[in-house]
Image (cartoon, rainbow, N blue to C red):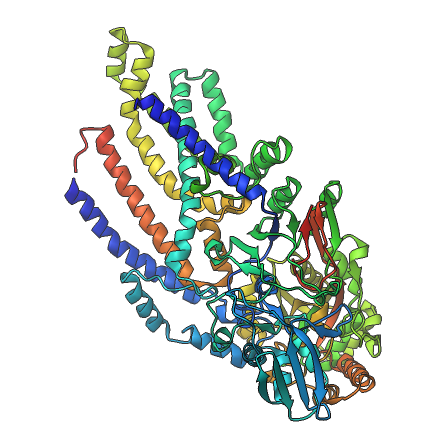
Amino acid sequence: MLGYVVRRLLMAVPVMGVVALVVFSLLYLTPGDPAQVLAGDTATPEQIAKIRTSLGLDEPPVARFAHWLWHMVQGDLGASIFSGEPVTHMIGQRLQPTFSLLLIAVVISVGVGVPFGVAAAARRGGFYDHALTTFTTLGFSLPAFIAGYGLAYLFATTLKWLPVQGFVPLEQGVDAWLRNLILPATTLSLVYAAIIARVTRASMLEVLSEDYIRTARAKGVAPRRILFRHALKNAAVPVMTVIGIGVATLIGSAVITENVFAIPGIGRLTVDAILHRDYPIIQGVVLLLSAGYVLVNVAVDLCYTLIDPRIRY
Amino acid sequence: MKRRNFLKGASLAGSALPFIGRQTLAATKTLKIIHNGNLASLDPIWTTAPPTKDYAFLVFDQLLAVDSKYVPHPQMAEGWTVEDDGKTYVLGLRQGLKFHDNVPVRSADCIASIQRWGARDGFGQLMMKFVDGFEAIDDAKFKIKLKKPFPLLPAALGKSNSSQCFIMPERMAKVDPMKQVTETIGSGPYRFLKEEFVSGAKAAWAKFDGYIPRKEPVDSIAGGRIPAVDRIEWAFISDPSTAMAALVAGEQDYWDAPALDLVPVMKADPNIIVSPRNLTGSYYMLQLNHVQPPFNNPKIRQALAMAIDQENFLKAAVSDPTLMKPCYSYYGVDSPYYSEQGADVLKVKSLDKAKAALKEAGYGGEKVVILGVMENPTFAAMAQVTEDLLKRLGMNVQLVAMDFATMAQRRTSKEPTDKGGWSCFITSWTGSDIVNPAVHQMLRAAGTSGWFGWPTDPEMESLRDQWTNATNEADQKKAAIALQVEAFKTLPYIPLGSLIALVAYRKNLTGVWPCPVAAYWNIGKS
């Protein structure tokens, strides 16, 4: 097992190297000049050239890439072109809001999606099944920014139960942290819960038609025990796969949700960096996300062994 | 201890923590501001980005500051005297001024700060051409020696448009002006709380107890800068609907740039005040490329100007007529040089006459590429109006949509349009940016070394020099207006009129005064 984990992590290194190269190349080809942006409208061409030189933007792209790569392997992702702050520090400041949002969104999605899918499969064609169809249709078709505005209007502006925007760090109290995350996490989890519910339902229906389930029923095992002990456990592998893929997808969706609810997370940092062509931040964030994606996949693979003892690495 | 009791105790302790926090905050008057921009750099000399300027007005102070009529007054200075037939200015500092690290402000700090600012700012660079040297008489008094009289010196030191001459400690001011300062020590009314700063997300300031405001009432950026709350927080909320909801819900107190389409909703709320604050307005311009066809032809530029009806451009951006101000001048309407002399071409407003003039000018179907910055709703709307107008004129038009960073790079190209060049773009400056020829970057015609568009007109440059060297107000005005008349012949850009920007804030705020910059001193909270 340990050998498998180490192998998977080592395999991630060339993947991230390719990601780094692709991102750097794309940024190099993208029009836009940070020196122009930060010099402002009153700057002369000479001043812009000086700023470009001071930032190292006039070096050949290969030299810039080599320079960045050399520092990156030493754990130094460089500094923001605009603020001068280390990229690792800036990303570090944004990790808690994004991870908090993702955590609550995953909890809501799994907490809603799995029981909903199980209930719909247990009574195929019944009330829960129809309700699930409605819920998943809404979840898939409602854009995050529409759902976010709707929820904020109802629960924050009209009922005043929850705050409209912002993030409160966990250190300032669990209740304030949670209150600020409920609406954005619910918005974010709509699609995700819908996917999980759909996959759970399909997987459960397949398992429920297996011979051993029929045998269990014939032996008089309680329906609830059949559902949760026998069927769900065997249906869990595809559900776990979807949860894993979903976590990675959520990171992308978080960009919109963070914007709607003014959460100072990785998503907003990325958008601002792209708008300003703050290359070191974009490169740092993409590397972090690709590393996160690899880690999530390794974690999902390991979870398979917990759910299904037949799976061994 | 039993597990249940332990959990109960931990739970109570956990719920008490935020309560304690709230008690502390309740005793602190905090002004919460929704700021649209992204505060990235903390050096107002290194960048002219508006959020950095707004940050700087809280943290730093100025030696002099202009009032609403652009008349300079002492700010950190006790006053100034002019000696040696206008060739020496002696400035004295007010007593008790100190930086946020409690070190007194000295002449050496002021001299180094002026030198750093003078290396970057346009007006500062102009002033430095006249400066022969600086001399610290003592820690509270210094001289600026000039090669020849420069009566605009106080206006330059006290100007309200970016970048302003902010005073920093000497060690900060000695940093290469092409590199950012890393410290945030100023002598302004609020201390920056760097440990709470999350670039692009959150910034906070605390009242500087050592600040001594002037006694005079505030007037524009002159007068007393009173820290009226204990703490100021900025939240960078880029989504307008979220910003409005936060203001209406009372989570935030002030919104510096409300989306115009949301204004009616906020006006309907009795707890919200929506009003203009920057009365100088934002002036919109159609910048033309003078080095490539078709706008390298002055007759084609004149034909285009004849077709333009400023109201069509302004109406595309706002629906409220009280927020629109057509302006047939190269100076803002509150400038001492405002005049409509020479502006006849802008009052033609006739498509038929423009078409005839375009034909006569020999337009041969050259492609017109409009750089449209779509992330700014006003720029986007005006770019589309331009596209429509040029098409109706019979021109071969392409509107290229892009973000600001792309436009900022592409506008540097002097190449033809089929090789990545451009023909025109919409831009805007505040009224204080176009108040006089020194600060007005677009009223230049120095050719390829000038601003994007690169108009060439030696007569315009000569008239600007005449204005700079004029020793009295009458001569200055005469030269400034002659410069405008000449500009309407050359058309370095075509003025599109001005829009009044609004701010929105909760009714319990006090002391919000008309100001050309987003300054937050004097604003209290009842």
Q: Residue at x 65, y 90 (%)?
A: B146
**Position of residue A297 in the picture relative to residue A86 (left or right):** left
Q: In this rendered view, identify the residue nearer to me: A102 or A31.
A: A102
User: Image height check: is A169 above or below B197?
Assistant: above
Residue B408, given in percent of the width and then of the height, sits at 56, 69
| Count of picture labels | 0
Q: Quadrant of residue B61?
A: bottom right
Depth check, front residue: B371 or B198? B198
Above or below: residue A114 compared with residue B121: above
Left or right: B151 in relation to B144 = right
Residue B394, quarter of picture: bottom right
Q: Kindly identify the residue that appears in the image at 30 percent across and 62 percent down.
A: A72
* Residue B290 visible: no
For residue A77, above or below residue A150: below
Residue B448 in the image: state x and y as whole percent. 60, 84
The spot of residue B429 in percent (x, y) is 68, 68
- Which of the image's four quarters has the C terminus of chain A? top left
Can residue B135 be seen here? The reply is: yes
Is residue B254 shown above or below B472? above
Horizontal side of residue A82 vs B315, given as left or right = left
In the image: residue A140, left or right of residue B457: left
Q: Quadrant of residue B307?
A: bottom right
Query: Which residue is located at x 37 percent, y 40 percent?
Result: A247
Residue A166 position within the rendered picture, expressed as x and y whole percent measured from the top left? 53, 44
**If the image is split into quadrants, where does the N terminus of chain A sit?**
top left
Q: Nearer the viewer, residue A129 or A12?
A: A12
